[in-house]
Every structure is written in structure tokens, then in C-alpha cells.
Image (tube, rainbow, N blue to C red):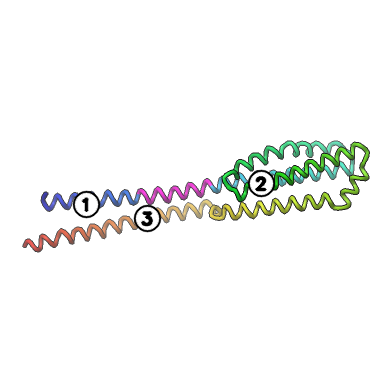
Amino acid sequence: MNQKSKKLWAYLCIGTVLLLLFAAEEAYILKQWRETLDAQHRQSAIREQVLRLHRLTAEIENGFRGYVLTRQSTFLAPMITAEAEIPHVLERLSNLTESTPALQGSVQVLRRRLQELVDTKRRLTLMIDAGERDAVLAYIRTGDGLALMKTIANVFDDLDTRINREFEDADLSRADKQTATIWQLVATQTGTVLLGVLIMELLLSAFAIPQRLGT
């Protein structure tokens, strides 16, 4: 094989290697970008379900208090609807956090506390219907209901803290993450080109030495 053919094959090999390196680095960066997007989407979906549970909890508490004070059955409608919806929202939240043990534990604690809330309000509502309104008012005055609501609020706060900790890397805005990804790709491509130029220069120098020696 003559000197010219050797140079050609060397250039082709170097070019192929550089292209493979660039493709591998680009695939890795884009994979990180997709993983970040997936994490952001999952975080948004989790927070949406948590907010729904916040709203449903408030509707149960407000409906119960309205019924205790007025004995108007209209206050029971949103309360009953909220009670029926909570299990479905909890199931969706449990599915979303299934792969995250730190969140799954808090979700299970929240499930137990909300079930306790539902059971307590149902029992107290039946007591009112049975003419035991004074006993229910005594329950409210002792602060037992307020203590349960504070416990539930603490569980919500703990879950929010865990969500923030779990998705800390995904909290960058999409625009910021996209900009960072673009700059990573530019830096990778630039580095690959510069490396290619350096290797080419070294090869040219290497091939020039035998020619000078031959002369």
C-alpha cells in the first residue's frame, strides 16, 4: 500500500471514530434531557393529585362544619362527593409514586389519615342525624377535630418536602434545561472537531517524517 493510500485510510478511520464519539456523546446528552423532561412531567402529575387531595379534604371539613351548624343537607352533597373521589385520587397518586419509595411511604400515611378523617366525619354525621348534636359539638369544642386536621396538614407538608427533595434536579425551568442541553451539544461538537484537527495535524506530521528522511 502506497503512502497516499495509507493517508486516506488513516483519515477515514479517524473520521469514523470521531463521528462515533460525537454520536455517543450526543445520545447521552439527549437521554439526560429526556429523563429530565419525564421527571418534570411526573412531578407535575404528582403535585396535581396532591392539590386535589388538599381540595377534597377542605370540602369534607367545610361540608361537615356547615351541616353541624345549620343542619342543612345541602352541605352534605360536596362532602359525600369528596369522600367518594378521595380513593381514586389516592390510587392515581400511589401509581405515580410507585417507583419512589420515599414518596410512597408518605402517600400511605396520607391514605390512613384521610381514611380516618372520612370515617370520623361519617360517624359524627350519623350522630347528628340520631339527635346527638350536643355530643358532636362537644367533640368540636375539645379540639379533637382540629388536631386531626393539623395531623393531616403535617402529612401534606412532609409529602411536599419529599417531592421537592426527590425532584430537585428537575426543578430547573424547561427553558434553562434546554439552553444547557444546547450548549452541551455545541461544546461536544466543538471538542470533537478540535480533537479531529489535532489528530490530523499529528498524522500529517507523522507521514511527513518518512518523506523527509527519504529525501
Quarter of the image holding residue 55? top right
Q: Which residue is mark 3?
A: 188
Q: Is residue 137 above or below residue 193?
A: above
What distance separates the C-alpha of mark 1 from that of mark 3? 20 Å
Is label 1 in a helix, a strand or a loop? helix
- Alpha carbons under labels 2 and 1: distance apart: 59 Å
Q: Position of residue 38 (x, y in %)?
A: 52, 46
Q: Amino acid at mark 2?
A: Val
Can you identify the residue that label 2 sits on?
A: 107
Instruction: Report the residue at 61% width, 41% height from top.
Output: 95
- Which portion, as a residue range, is magenta? 23-38
Q: Nearer the viewer, mark 2 or mark 1?
A: 2
Binning the other alpha carbons within 10 Å of mark 2 as few (below 14), some (14 to 19) or many (20 upward) gives many
Question: Is 26 colored magenta in this rendering?
Answer: yes
Q: Which residue is mark 1?
A: 11
Which sits earlier in the primary sequence, circle 3 or circle 2? 2
Label 1 neighbourhood size at 10 Å, few (<14), some (14-19), many (20+)?
some
